[in-house]
């Protein structure tokens, strides 16, 4: 069992948890992910590692409600335990590997974090800061209520640019618009890392292609085992089948087939929505849709 | 009683079982087992033992059954096999022990598999455990993977007094016995969990949620954790796909994914959260045991289910019993047919599959007649789900993170067949990680050989 040693509500429907998991905490690196399972009936949920403390033997995860499984995990409290917690899985971010450090130091790097993507961007920026590389970060969100980690990010990044779609905080516009504005001011970058919802990564990659900035994205497709067995997380990268769990999760953003990846991610949308309703409201039929016949 | 005929085994009615996940075969009761055991000729030079990859003393255990000595029968089997309740259910006996039975020359061979199952089930129901080593020898061995190879290797080493720890990547122990083979062939709680408990009763520790190569490497196990030898039984790896258009569409699954959702994550059971696509019409591509398992699972989840296989029935790699059961339950076999393309609707979901008919030509390298396309015979099957069951290619996690471990051109770990020894001192391997996808019992045979190899190595060290 893996105890929850700290829980913090970051924003609406977004919760941070520190999980005591000595083996994972000892080994994990920025860019990797874990799989957590709440209890016997729970799903295996892949979550990107957001921070870790090797001494306290904890790993930080950030969970956002998507379906019943994530909702039930979020409802746990400090002192509760997760039944399963396995990792670190996937490959570490190439930028955060000691062997690439000299090369990395030569680059002007920009991170674009969208929504929940702020969480996995943070450990990379922090690792780079601790290794003498200062980077810029764009934090993009729909609205200010969904923002988190601003101060933490400012403490480890050179410049932090916050952008909200509705203009409720910082720059009025999305991350892409903020990046275009920076370029208009004459800023340039040699490397971009974009992490967030697939649609955000898609448009960021399209823009950086135009701006000729090599771009890494972190893919978060549906997974089951996460260890290279089931093949659920397959995606097309440069015309080849890749498995996000063992080949990724980071890929060249200019080669990923995002449209297909987004279609695949929606595969269980109906089931997830139904399960969440059943968990929150006790049933899934409210009558009136006129299609399912469930209220008859 | 006709001694040429085996005692028939009771099964769930095909129409009923096609709609549930209860076990298909009920197995023998004591009376039936004794009657069947009495058909054994107790051959001096027993051919059946030579056909068994783990060399169970078959005539001896059957003789005990004949005499109503079920506990003795169990201890006899346990000397050679760690998983008799599993093997009695999923071994291809017809091509192993039973295939060599002298009774088979003129009549039915003795139902060795069903007798083994009876003995193992009886022992479990009566709380009989395998015998533990009298004293430990103080040597530590790590086993990677808790599937059939790992459990067998661990069990054998524990009986010799080794302190064995199994590291399992998933959250439950059992490997393919848990995620791959469905409940209706191999009950998880009743049979698999009980066999795992028996291995633990021998003193073996099992640590789940540890991915070797990620959580910790083999070199660290040896250098930092004090393990003197390591056995790799990490199993098969990533699923293969055909490389045809439409394969990335929604509704296309590997058999591994489909079965893992259903078996490991229990998607078929009310209350479990992991979703599974309950198709209306499912096409399974492939002809092996895994394809049969996927097809029979889809059928039970309520779909009209087709198997599409490019050769004819005679070449189906699946066990005859599995094919027979699948047919009885209503799986439709579209043989000598091969998919050309998966048809996708405007939302990215499967809407059908384009198939071409095949005929058998000259034998190929495998000795089987090569299927060739019949020109102009293309047609389409409407379906909403396609399950690809084409085998797997090895998982890179261990071979890529272990210094000095040789792999072959298919990326399988290279290991000596007799001892399981790899190119790295103290590291042994067996099962699908070495051979590519094969059977439970062959993996067990390899686990057993490696246990002997490790014992020899550590005894002389």
Image (tube, grey):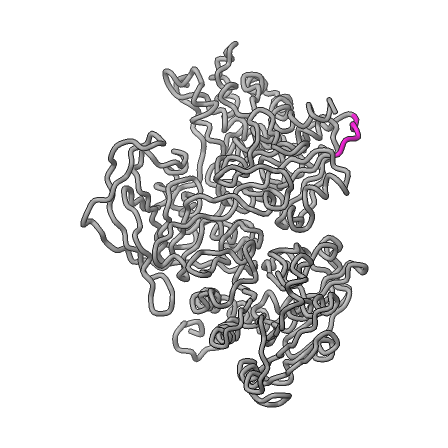
Residue A123 at x, y percent in the picture: 69, 67
Above or below residue A271? Residue A26 is above
Q: Which quadrant of the figure has residue A88?
A: bottom right
Residue B258 at x, y percent in the picture: 47, 52
Residue A82 at x, y percent in the picture: 69, 59
Q: Nearer the viewer, residue A242 or B30?
A: A242
The residue positioned 75% from the left and 34% from the top of the image is: B140
Q: Nearer the viewer, residue A185 or A259?
A: A185
The residue positioned 51% from the left and 37% from the top of the image is: B408
Q: Is residue B139 magenta?
A: yes
Q: Nearer the viewer, residue A158 or B107?
A: A158
Quarter of the image with the C terminus of chain A is bottom left
Q: Residue lying at the far left in this picture: please name it.
A: B376
Q: Which quadrant of the figure has residue A193?
A: bottom right
Q: Nearer the viewer, residue A130 or A235?
A: A130
What are the residue bounds of the magenta stretch?
B135-140
* Residue A36 visible, this orientation: no
Q: Is residue B5 magenta?
A: no
Query: Taking A228 as reference, is B155 left or right?
Result: right
Q: Tell me which secondary structure the magenta stretch mostly adopts.
A: loop
The residue positioned 53% from the left and 62% from the top of the image is: A251
Q: Which quadrant of the figure has residue B123?
A: top right
Quarter of the image with the N terminus of chain A is bottom right
Residue A41 at x, y percent in the picture: 60, 57
Query: Taking A142 as reference, is A105 left or right?
Result: right
**How many labels sit on residues?**
0
Query: Taking B62 as reference, is A80 left or right?
Result: right
């Amino acid at each position: 069992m893996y105890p929850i040693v700290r829980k913090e509500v970051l924003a609406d429907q977004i919760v941070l948890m520190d999980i005591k998991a000595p083996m994972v905490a000892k080994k994990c690196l920025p860019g990797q992910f874990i799989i957590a399972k709440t209890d016997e009936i729970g799903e295996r949920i892949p979550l990107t590692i957001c921070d870790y403390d090797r001494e306290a033997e904890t790993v930080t995860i950030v969970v956002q409600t998507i379906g019943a499984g994530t909702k039930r995990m979020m409802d746990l409290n400090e002192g509760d335990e997760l039944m399963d917690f396995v990792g670190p899985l996937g490959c570490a971010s190439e930028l955060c590997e000691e062997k690439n450090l000299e090369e990395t130091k030569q680059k002007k790097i920009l991170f674009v974090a969208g929504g929940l993507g702020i969480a996995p961007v943070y450990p990379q920026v922090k690792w780079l800061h601790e290794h003498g590389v200062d980077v810029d970060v764009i934090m993009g969100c729909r609205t200010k209520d969904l923002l988190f980690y601003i101060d933490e990010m400012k403490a480890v990044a050179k410049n932090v640019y916050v952008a909200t779609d509705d203009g409720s905080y910082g720059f009025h516009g999305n991350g892409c618009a903020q990046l275009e504005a920076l370029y208009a001011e004459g800023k340039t970058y040699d490397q971009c890392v974009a992490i967030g919802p697939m649609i955000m990564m898609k448009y960021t990659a399209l823009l950086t292609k135009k701006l000729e900035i090599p771009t890494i994205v972190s893919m978060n497709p549906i997974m089951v085992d996460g260890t290279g067995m089931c093949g659920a997380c397959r995606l097309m990268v440069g015309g080849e089948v890749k498995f996000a769990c063992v080949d990724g999760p980071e890929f060249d953003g200019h080669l990923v087939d995002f449209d297909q990846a987004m279609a695949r991610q929606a595969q269980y949308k109906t089931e997830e929505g139904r399960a969440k309703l059943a968990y929150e409201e006790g049933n899934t039929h409210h009558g009136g849709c006129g299609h399912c016949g469930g209220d008859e | 009683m006709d001694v040429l005929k085996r005692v028939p085994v009771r099964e769930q009615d095909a129409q009923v079982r096609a709609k549930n996940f209860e076990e298909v075969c009920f197995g023998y009761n004591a009376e039936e087992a004794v009657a069947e055991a009495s058909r054994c000729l107790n051959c001096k030079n027993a051919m059946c033992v030579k056909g068994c990859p783990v060399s169970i003393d078959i005539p001896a255990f059957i003789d005990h059954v004949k005499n109503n000595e079920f506990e003795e029968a169990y201890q006899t089997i346990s000397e050679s096999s760690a998983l008799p309740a599993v093997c009695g259910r999923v071994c291809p006996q017809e091509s192993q022990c039973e295939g060599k039975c002298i009774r088979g020359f003129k009549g039915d061979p003795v139902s060795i598999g069903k007798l083994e199952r009876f003995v193992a089930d009886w022992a479990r129901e009566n709380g009989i455990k395998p015998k533990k080593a009298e004293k430990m020898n103080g040597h530590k061995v790590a086993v990677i993977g808790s599937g059939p190879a790992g459990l067998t290797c661990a069990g054998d080493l524990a009986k010799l007094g080794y302190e064995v720890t199994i590291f399992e990547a998933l959250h439950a122990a059992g490997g393919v016995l848990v995620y791959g083979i469905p409940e209706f062939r191999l009950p998880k709680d009743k049979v698999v969990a009980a066999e795992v408990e028996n291995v633990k009763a021998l003193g073996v520790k099992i640590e789940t949620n540890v991915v070797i190569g990620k959580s910790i490497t083999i070199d660290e196990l040896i250098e930092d954790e004090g393990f003197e030898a390591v056995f790799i039984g990490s199993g098969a790896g990533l699923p293969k796909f055909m490389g045809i258009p439409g394969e990335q569409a929604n509704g296309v699954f590997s058999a591994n994914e489909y079965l893992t959702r259903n078996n490991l994550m229990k998607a078929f059971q009310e209350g479990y959260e992991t979703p599974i696509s309950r198709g209306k019409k499912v096409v399974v591509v492939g002809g092996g045991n895994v394809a049969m398992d996927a097809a029979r699972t889809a059928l039970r989840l309520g779909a009209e289910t087709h198997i599409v296989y490019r050769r004819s029935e005679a070449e189906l790699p699946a066990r005859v019993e599995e094919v027979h059961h699948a047919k009885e339950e209503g799986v439709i076999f579209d043989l000598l047919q091969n998919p050309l393309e998966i048809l996708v609707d405007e939302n990215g979901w499967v809407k059908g599959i384009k198939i071409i008919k095949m005929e058998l030509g000259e034998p190929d390298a495998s000795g089987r007649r090569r299927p060739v396309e019949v020109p102009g015979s293309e047609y389409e099957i409407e379906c909403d789900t396609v399950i690809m069951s084409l085998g797997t290619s090895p998982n890179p996690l261990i071979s890529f993170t272990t210094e000095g471990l040789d792999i072959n051109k298919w990326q399988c770990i290279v290991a000596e067949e007799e001892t399981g020894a790899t190119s790295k001192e103290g590291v042994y391997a067996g099962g699908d990680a070495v051979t590519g996808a094969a059977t439970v019992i062959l993996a067990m045979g390899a686990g057993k050989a490696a246990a002997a190899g490790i014992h020899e190595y550590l005894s002389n060290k």
